[in-house]
């Protein structure tokens, strides 16, 4: 298996993870970080504000801040609902990734986008992401492509859970299986796999929304072309978010 996370970053994560796991307060701190992630992931208001191009594409230019903030509050609650649903899956005997299937993905997306037309199933028409300059696969091939991603993720998980989690993030997002909420769904799935292994979530702050958004331009195309070298930046970026959360825990618990 090709290692997608650079060795130095992986070593840093490993060393910090060993330190925090020994602290009895770590798991409470990790729980708090999961709530922070839900707030960051659901607060699409902040993302729209910093990304004028996306705001225009989503026809949000004329909406007043009060309306957008109200939508953001709903979005955050939806993420919390989806995370609670995911937290009930998996157990000590059967890890979450072994239970993960198309039905769970569909349910998570429906919780994230309950008002979206067509929520509760994969998309039924082709889509073009004009903002990213990327055309996802035909809608007719979505079920098989999703199954393939899940199968490969399980194989990767046996050797490297961290990379398997990030692979799910990139692989599912690149397929764009749903009409809306694809990246949010994929990120929650990623974080749920990380949670099983004791890792904190990979929190991407709202202020990094534009960079994260633009990173997909190259990452989607690299994934579609099976260009592993050009996917490394995406893996390192997500892994660095885990690393940052470990730093936060180390600071909060005053671990040296």
Image (cartoon, grey):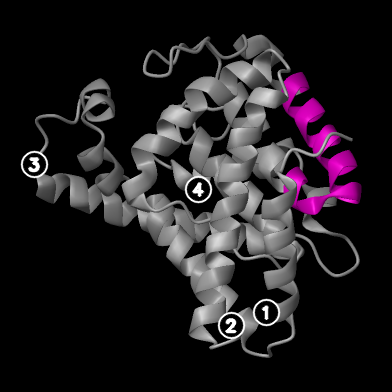
Earlier along the polypeptide chain: callout 4 or callout 3?
3
Query: Callout 2: few (<14), some (14-19), or many (20+) C-alpha neighbours within 10 Å?
Result: few
Earlier along the polypeptide chain: callout 4 or callout 1?
1
Residue behind mark 3: 64
Confirm or deny contact between disc 4 and disc 2 (CB under 8 A).
Answer: no
What is the quadrant of the N terminus in the image? top right
Residue behind mark 2: 28
Query: Callout 3: few (<14), some (14-19), or many (20+) C-alpha neighbours within 10 Å?
Result: few
Q: Is residue 132 above or below residue 195?
A: above
Disc number placed over residue 111 in the picture, else none: 4
| Image position of 155 (left or right of 143) | right
Taking the spot 43% from the left edge, 18% from the top edge, the residue there is 132
Earlier along the polypeptide chain: callout 2 or callout 1?
1
Question: Distance between the Cα atoms at labels 2 and 1?
Answer: 11 Å
Taking the spot 59% from the left edge, 69% from the top edge, the residue there is 246
> Can you tell which of label 4 and label 3 is closer to the viewer?
3
SS under mark 4: helix
Question: Distance between the Cα atoms at labels 4 and 1?
Answer: 32 Å
For the record, the magenta segment spans: 144-164
Question: Distance between the Cα atoms at labels 2 and 3?
Answer: 38 Å
Taking the spot 79% from the left edge, 36% from the top edge, the residue there is 150
Question: Distance between the Cα atoms at labels 4 and 3?
Answer: 25 Å
Residue behind mark 1: 20
């Amino acid at each position: 298996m090709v290692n997608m996370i650079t060795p130095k970053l992986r070593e840093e994560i490993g060393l910090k993870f060993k330190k925090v796991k020994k602290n009895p307060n770590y798991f409470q701190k990790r729980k708090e970080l999961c709530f922070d992630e839900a707030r960051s992931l659901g607060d699409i208001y902040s993302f729209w504000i910093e990304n004028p191009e996306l705001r225009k594409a989503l026809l949000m230019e004329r909406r007043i801040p009060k309306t957008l903030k109200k939508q953001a509050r709903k979005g955050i609650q939806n993420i919390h609902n989806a995370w609670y649903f995911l937290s009930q899956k998996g157990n000590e005997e059967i890890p979450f990734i072994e239970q993960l299937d198309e039905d769970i993905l569909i349910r998570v997306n429906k919780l994230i986008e309950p008002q979206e037309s067509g929520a509760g199933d994969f998309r039924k028409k082709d889509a073009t992401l004009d903002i990213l300059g990327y055309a996802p696969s035909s809608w007719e091939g979505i079920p098989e492509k999703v199954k393939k991603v899940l199968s490969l993720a399980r194989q990767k998980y046996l050797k490297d859970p961290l990379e398997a989690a990030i692979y799910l993030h990139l692989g599912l997002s690149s397929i764009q299986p749903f009409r809306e909420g694809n990246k949010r769904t994929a990120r929650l799935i990623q974080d749920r796999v990380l949670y099983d292994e004791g890792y904190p979530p990979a929190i991407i702050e709202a202020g990094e929304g534009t960079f994260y958004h633009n990173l997909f331009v190259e990452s989607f195309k690299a994934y579609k072309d099976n260009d592993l070298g050009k996917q490394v930046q995406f893996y390192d970026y997500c892994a660095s978010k885990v690393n940052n959360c470990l730093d936060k825990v180390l600071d909060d618990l005053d671990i040296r």
